[in-house]
Image: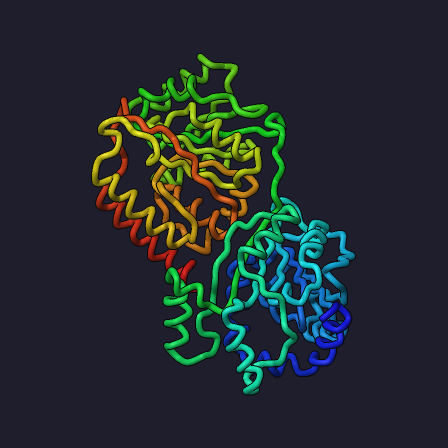
Amino acid sequence: MNTEAIRRHFDHIAAERDHWKQKNWYYYHELEKYCSFVVPAGSRVLEIGCGTGDLLAAVKPARGLGIDISPEMIKRATQKYPRLEFQAGDVEQLQIDEKFDYVILSDVIGYLEDIQCAFLQLRRVTTASTRILITYYNYAWEPVLRLGELGGLKMKQPRQNWLPLSEISNLLYLADYEVIKKGYRFLFPKYIPILSTLMNRFLAKLPIINRLCLVEVLIAKEITPARNPGDFTCSVIVPCRNERGNIEAAVTRIPQMGSHTEIIFVDGSSTDGTPEEIKAQQKKHKTKDIKLIHQENGVGKGDAVRRGFAAAEGDILMILDADLTVLPEDLPKFFNALIAGQAEFINGSRLVYQMQAQAMRLLNHLGNYFFSLIFTYLLEQRFRDTLCGTKALFKADYEKIALNRHFFGDLDPFGDFDLIFGASKLNLKTIEIPVRYHQRTYGSTKINRFSHGWLLLKMCLVAFRKLKLV
């Protein structure tokens, strides 16, 4: 069907659209719930193919604009949600010059005559930080959906294009977008108590079975071009407690990155003279920007990281553990990957290169492997070393993570998982960079393998509930 025929079809069914949605309320409720999970409330949101406006209203935007090819749909959406704005329009000839945080295309791309053209038009409304959320039906369900139409269980719809996830990803790439996440949802779109929950919350998340789900989901962003290193400043946060013997090496070995690099030591009530050594290094290296922050009543590395990030003035934030088991000389790899547009959040991985003997004990190694499997499953992205303390991200993205910290709660005493969970929730492009791991030369580890391992398990349970049971 061409564009005009599609417009006539949706004008014709506009009056009964809400009736059919009510008849299949469970599917639409679950779809709205998922989109509300992806899109933080208070965002600037554009929905293409908004219909009568229910999905746009469900994500609670601060600024919400709905576009639909059907004037009749737009008329009803405007009546239902006067707080939001709705316009009749065609995404293949988009007439909007406004930028949004999120663009939603739900169950719409199958009706487009030229999907690549439509994706190219989206460049008018997206920035480097915009996320595009696309949902589309799994073509394996085509016979079931047609039977549903024949049996009066589903509204009749024109035939659509067959678009597997790989094809949608390719069309996005041709329009200079890259896919951050993709997957499947909704194994059972009808509501039957207990059965629906079991199938959609648990079975639908299992490998292989998930490919039988009704809905394909993609989250994409603009492909970011490489930028000039001189346009960025950097802050390296060094949490420390009783690390006096490592301070001078940290100061001398942390490289200069970008136009300016500041080093922020956050001291956790050291008793071995660590603060005094930091002050001595400030006097000795007056050309370096070295700051000292005291944790006061704060406890743990997580609190130290948050205090350091709050005080940081750099465009890019990094964490370097004061034990220097990860080499400061590896930090430019993180900086360069960020400004090259290869990532928005970077996690270090100590489990690639050979490490010095005794650098990581056997139980710690096994624990890392165990939690890497759990996190890869929870976050639907490969994480080889979740416990590496070296991480990097843009300050602007960290501020978004901090604003949404309430979603997971303040459970993380380490600071690592607050960032990993937060980056996943905001759909930041995440990569791992291998780092070299060396044996500690001064002081002792602050990690208790068993009590901290139990804390990690509890945090994984929270993440499972928050991320997988949506």
Left or right of 295? Residue 87 is: right
| Picture residue at 77% right of the left edge, 58% below the top | 93
Residue 152: x %, y % from top left: 57, 86
Q: Is residue 448 visible?
A: no
In front here: 432 or 33? 432
Q: Quadrant of residue 366?
A: top left
Residue 216: x %, y % from top left: 52, 63
In which quadrant will I find the N terminus? bottom right
Examine the rendered structure and indicate whether residue 430 appears above or below residue 119: above
Q: Quadrant of residue 274?
A: top left
Examine the rendered structure and indicate whether residue 179 appears above or below residue 114: above
Q: Is residue 46 visible?
A: yes
Examine the rendered structure and indicate whether residue 145 appears above or below residue 62: below
In front here: 277 or 411? 411
Furthest-bottom residue in this view: 151
Residue 9: x %, y % from top left: 72, 77
In front here: 117 or 218? 117
Furthest-top residue in this view: 284
Left or right of 169? Residue 307 is: left
Residue 111: x %, y % from top left: 67, 67
| Picture residue at 36% right of the left edge, 42% below the top | 384
In which quadrant will I find the C terminus? bottom left
Q: How many marks?
A: 0
In front here: 140 or 429? 140
Color style of the picture: rainbow
